[in-house]
Amino acid sequence: MKFDHIDGFASTHHGLISRPRAEALGVSTSSWYRAIAAQVIEPIHPNVARLRGSPETFEQRALAAVWGAGRGAVSSHRTSASLWNVSRPASDPIDLILPARTREARLDGVVVHRPVDLMDLRPIIRRKIPTTNPMRMLLDLGAVDQDAVFDALIEVLASKVASPASVRRTMMRHAKKGRHGVGPLRLALERWLGEELPPDSALEAKMAEFITRHQLPAVTFHAVVMGYEVDFLISGTHIVLECDGWGTHGLDRDQFEFDRVRNGELTAAGYIVVHFTWRQLTTDPESVAVRILENVQRWAPGLARPRRR
């Protein structure tokens, strides 16, 4: 029997063929086992084999593990880091996530993760291998190798496969008690930015305390203005307050241009946008308060109150 159809598929999939794929190519069950007996292919995992003589590579090991684990499996953690071109030790095991907690998958040399957190697991194909997106990868990497997260973050940002904003949004979406990996990623972002990185709840609480202490008008958090979400809107006015920080460091060009378009449309509609940073809010709140009050006195004088020293 000729196995050209197996050869053709395996040659474009790191030397691998799976039994379901072989069947789709017209290879019967008996032919599959004859190919093994004839040493045309050699089993790696159940229902996964490689062409005899094909190079044994990292990619081959990763794809074989995903296929061997079955439907829904996706490479993750350290393996995903490598696929996103993050430098990793050659001694790393193959990591994969198996979302279906009702199914077993025990594979030699493979660490199978069954997380409760199933967000952001839509696979992305890298080098023919289904893997997690780079933001989810950074979180998962922190759960198994927290010391490696900072260097991985730098490589991800430098390659522009993710922006600081997208990494932070993913981190906040997954942040909850018991979620391993959030802490190391937060520390890595803070170290990269050189400043504390507050969650939305902390920003809202800090701003509420700031408004009360400096006797400023009430604000609405995450108000929608002209179809855009802003950090704060001084209630009853056209004054928008934007707390910058992580969002102004290293944003990709699309985000940079979006912010300028948004600010331009808000300004054209008569809104005043007052920018300040998280660092200024925490280390020099007096100057931030003065700037906000000056705008209130000019654009909404009826809300301005004399400030007590």
Image: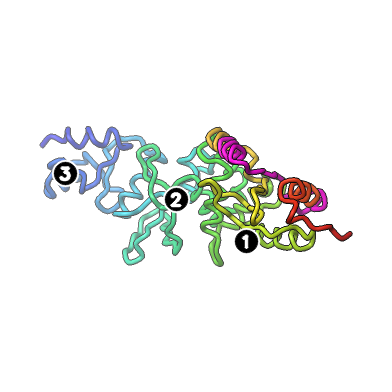
**Image x and y of residue 45, in percent:** 30, 51
Question: Which residue is tagged 3?
Answer: 24
User: Residue 76 bears which disc, if any?
Assistant: 2
Mark 2 or 1: the one toward you: 1
**Image x and y of residue 21, in percent:** 21, 44
Judge from the rendering whether residue 100 lies leftward or rightward of residue 183; answer left or right. left
Bin the neighbour count of mark 1 within 10 Å (Cα to Cα): few under 14, some 14-19, many 20 and up.
Answer: few
Q: Is residue 158 visible?
A: no
Q: Which residues are magenta?
A: 259-288
Q: Earlier in the sequence, mark 2 or mark 1?
A: 2
* Depth check, front residue: 106 or 292: 292
Mark 2 lies on a secondary structure that is loop
Please state which amino acid type lies under the numbered disc 2. Answer: Ser
Q: CA distance from mark 3 to mark 2?
A: 27 Å
Which quarter of the picture shows residue 72?
Answer: bottom left
Mark 1 or 3: the one toward you: 1
Q: Please determine whether, in this image, residue 70 is positioned above or below residue 1.
A: below
- Where, quadrant-wise, is the N terminus in this rendering? top left
Mark 1 lies on a secondary structure that is helix
Q: Which is the main secondary structure of the residues drawn in magenta?
A: helix
Q: Is residue 147 visible?
A: yes
Q: Residue at x 34, y 60 (%)?
A: 105
Q: Earlier in the sequence, mark 3 or mark 2?
A: 3
**Image x and y of residue 47, in percent:** 24, 51
Is there a contact, CB below 8 Å, between mark 2 and mark 1?
no
Please state which amino acid type lies under the numbered disc 1. Answer: Ser
Question: Which residue is tagged 1?
Answer: 201
* Depth check, front residue: 245 or 290: 290
